[in-house]
Image: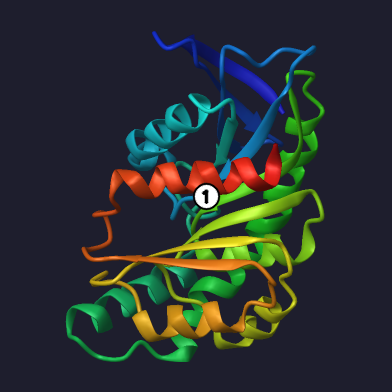
Amino acid sequence: MRFTSEQRFDDGVLEREFTLGDDIPGILWTPASATAASPARLILAGHPGGLPMMYPRLVARARHAAAEGYASASIELPWSGDRPRSADADEARAELRAAVRAGEPVSDDVVDRLVLPLVEQSVPEWRAALDDLLALPEICGPAGFAGGVIAIGVRLAAVEPRIAAAVLFAGSYVPRRMFEEARQVTIPLHVLLQWDDEGNDRQMALDLFDAFGSAEKTLQANMGGHTGVPQFAADNANRFFDRHLK
């Protein structure tokens, strides 16, 4: 991981852009209180891809978390932003969007072709990022994961022991075969569901929540569309991490 730029906001949060490996862009936000003597817990900030497009929402989430003493980091997803495209992923994404616009069911085949390769490639990248981020003296574990793509969060929660708790955004499709992985997830979970999310299968989200094997799991459902998550949901997420990371 190589840092390529930095800026400090007026609230003291330090933002540093970095490159992971040869071509994976990422951003790290650390609160002013984070030092080697008093390191900050880390939250991995998931998103649906397109780091420049997602930046306004990511930086808002990171600064909100930093106010409670957390560092946040995010990396670009495969085939998004400036990373090389995948013709197969583009085709599957187009088919999914066409089905949603037409009000038709999204087939399991389309979901598998789009999401499974994304999970297979991105989860090792997130774990490599976690290796380097936790090696920084001003950051410590255990870590949390917050955001989507929810299938990525499911896999990370199942296989990465350094992630102690997760806030999952139920705003994307999940391959049916990953429900078995969900049953293997045992860490505390806080799942956010927008009840009127036009691009999400609500029943699939409810079925996935039911499948999680965690003894502590909470579902917070709010009225509104995909981008209508209320501010108090972020406050609840911070309180959730306070219980499990600090």
> Residue reaching furthest left?
102
Looking at this view, is 221 or 154 the one in front? 221
Looking at this view, is 117 or 48 the one in front? 48
- Image spot of residue 78 (x, y percent): 55, 54
Location of the C terminus by quadrant is top right
User: In the drawing, does residue 59 fall left or right of residue 146?
Assistant: left
User: In the drawing, does residue 233 fall left or right of residue 82?
Assistant: left
Looking at the rendered structure, the secondary structure element under dot 1 is: loop
Q: Which residue is mark 1?
A: 46
Task: Identify the residue at image location x=82%, y=55%.
Answer: 161
Figure check: 33 above or below 72? above
Figure check: 52 above or below 34? below
Looking at this view, is 146 or 23 the one in front? 146
User: In the drawing, does residue 235 fall left or right of residue 225?
Assistant: right
Figure check: 245 above or below 132? below
Residue 43, by quadrant, is top right
Q: Can residue 118 be seen in this snapshot?
A: no
Residue 195, by quadrant, is bottom left
- Image spot of residue 225 (x, y percent): 22, 63
Looking at this view, is 8 or 91 the one in front? 8
Callout 1: 10 Å neighbours few (<14), some, many (20+)?
A: many
- Image spot of residue 183 (x, y percent): 69, 81
- Image spot of residue 232 (x, y percent): 34, 45
The amino acid type, in three-letter code, at marker 1 is Gly
Task: Identify the residue at image location x=24%, y=54%.
Answer: 228
Figure check: 45 above or below 221? above
Q: Can residue 57 be seen in this snapshot?
A: yes
Task: Identify the residue at image location x=65%, y=67%.
Answer: 216
